[in-house]
Image (cartoon, rainbow, N blue to C red):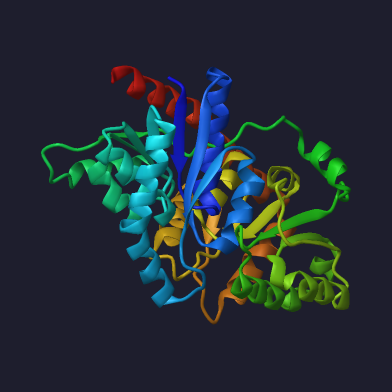
Amino acid sequence: MKTLVFSGTGYGGHLTAALAVRQAVLQARPGLQIVYVAAEPPQRIDRVIQRWRGGARFIPLCRGQGPAIRVCRMGQVLTSGLFEARRILRALSPDAVLGFGGYGSVPAVLAARSLRVPTLVHEQNVELGWANRLLIYFSDVLVTSHDKTRSQLEASRTWSKGPELVCMGMPLEERPYCTRDQARQQLGLKPNAFVLLVLGGSQGAKTLNRIFYDLIGSLSRDLASRLQVIHQTGEEDSLSATRFYAENQIDHRVIAFTHELPLFLKAADLAVARAGAAAVHELRYYATPTLFVPYPHANSHQQENARIAQEEAWAEMHLEGPDTAQTLRKSLSQLIQNPDQVRERCQRAKNISNVGSAKQIAEKVFSLCDDE
């Protein structure tokens, strides 16, 4: 066993999961070559290179945004993308190909199937995305992050032959352990402030930012003065956010994007966030109670992710709408004034936090290759 190919997109939970499994694979077998093959438009390639920091190959897709561009990309991944992926795999001769979801994973997994290379696909969300709904018919193993997903797929299985379905959780990279106080000290935060972390996802979230500004504007001066806000805004909103907090005299730190998110999660008392798969799993793993505002245009993926977290009783779900700022303000005010409730939610998250997923997936890959 010499080479593995990982494939997916260059953002969100796809790359987060891939990085964690790479870490586990290399800890077990340090000599392996792992290449990330991503079908991506040009503007996202730099983000992949920054985070992957290793061998990567890119299948270029059309530039731009909007429904027409998305349709164009879907066509590309199934045509020219597939041919390019076959060329890359022939050159690399991988022992297995792992797909981590998103359109960026489709060419490599389909190419692997056509070349009789073993395949494993991982799903981070409660509901399968469109890519994995397709790839389930072309994979040897489908690993889910939630047992609910595995159970539903088993119950609805309509094919005589298909992938092995297993639930192993969401893989997350291992980080050096630190306490809440140590995290705050490293970040230069006040030790006794109520630290509120606002996350718009890997690319920021303009609407969530506006909702949060409305929330802050409606807080009483007494409650607002207790806060120290850390706000990941995305590149476009960082200057306007800094200006907003300064004008409203809110103790703040604005970051456009960070690779040190676990440190911020450990330092925070509470988070307000979108409900992408990586965010939900990391917030649970680091036991950060959260008020989730699912992105409404993600085919209900985020809503289902947030609903599971709410059922686990360490988080709340607030659907995006005209009254979202008001409902968030009510919850936030209650939690600032009742720190015992925050600690209770933190403990619930610790009790269910999933550890060891990356190592389990790595072992599954090894067995998949050894069976061939």
Any part of residue 289 in sight: yes
| Residue 218 or residue 38, whichever sits in front | 38
Q: Residue at x 44, y 61 (%)?
A: 303
Residue at the image position 24 percent from the left and 36 percent from the top? 163
Measured from the top left, where is residue 86 in percent x and y?
35, 44
Question: Is residue 147 shown above or below 272?
Answer: above
Residue 299 % position (x, y): 38, 65
Can you tell which quarter of the image residue 224 is in? bottom right
Quick check: 187 left or right of 350?
Answer: right
Farthest residue in the bottom direction?
322
Q: Nearer the viewer, residue 319 or 18?
A: 18
Residue drawn 39% across and 77% down? 68
Q: Position of residue 39 (x, y in %)?
A: 45, 54
Q: Quadrant of the N terminus?
A: top left
Q: Which residue is at a point 78% across and 76% down the rendered structure image?
A: 240
Q: Confirm whether residue 128 shows in the render.
A: no
Percent across and percent down for residue 21 are: 51, 33
Task: Give the quadrant of the C terminus.
Answer: top left
Q: Nearer the viewer, residue 321 or 127?
A: 127
Q: Quadrant of residue 286?
A: top right
Left or right: where does residue 249 sit relative to residue 231? right
